[in-house]
Amino acid sequence: MTEGDSDLTAFIPALANLYRSGRLPFDRMARLYEPSRIDEVAAEATGGQVLKPVLRFTD
């Protein structure tokens, strides 16, 4: 298999099972930030404190 070549009918349920068993804590992998904290975002991403920093823009 290559990137994007997974069998979604097997892959998605496998991910759900990993999450349910506590082995895939995706809810703890991402962290939301306000755009004003961009310097903190960069430092935490570079330092490995967060896997997926997400800037959240609001109206």
Image (cartoon, rainbow, N blue to C red):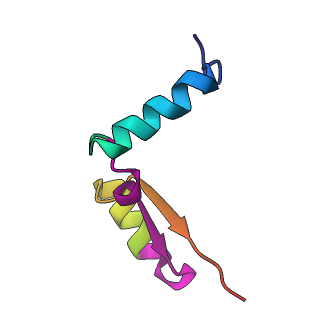
Instruction: Reply above or below: 28 against 58.
Output: above
Q: Quadrant of residue 6?
A: top right
Task: Describe residue 54's horizontal placement relative to residue 57 as left or right.
Answer: left
Q: Residue at x 28, y 59 (%)?
A: 49
- Residue nearer the viewer, 51 or 13: 13
Q: Residue at x 62, y 26 (%)?
A: 8
Farthest-out residue, bottom: 59
Q: Position of residue 48 (x, y in %)?
A: 30, 53
Instruction: Reply above or below: 42 against 22.
Output: below
Magenta span of residues: 24-39
Task: Describe residue 24's horizontal placement relative to residue 31 as left or right.
Answer: left
Q: Residue at x 28, y 40 (%)?
A: 23
- Residue nearer the viewer, 1 or 47: 1
Residue 36 inside the magenta-drawn segment:
yes
- Residue nearer the viewer, 15 or 49: 15
Instruction: Reply above or below: 59 against 55.
Output: below
Q: Please tell me how many numbered marks the rendered image carries.
A: 0
Q: Residue at x 57, y 10 (%)?
A: 1
Residue 38 inside the magenta-drawn segment:
yes
Task: Describe residue 4's horizontal placement relative to residue 54 as left or right.
Answer: right
Farthest-out residue, top: 1
Quadrant of the image containing the C terminus: bottom right
Q: Position of residue 15 (x, y in %)?
A: 45, 35
Q: Position of residue 29 (x, y in %)?
A: 38, 54
Q: Position of residue 26 (x, y in %)?
A: 40, 51
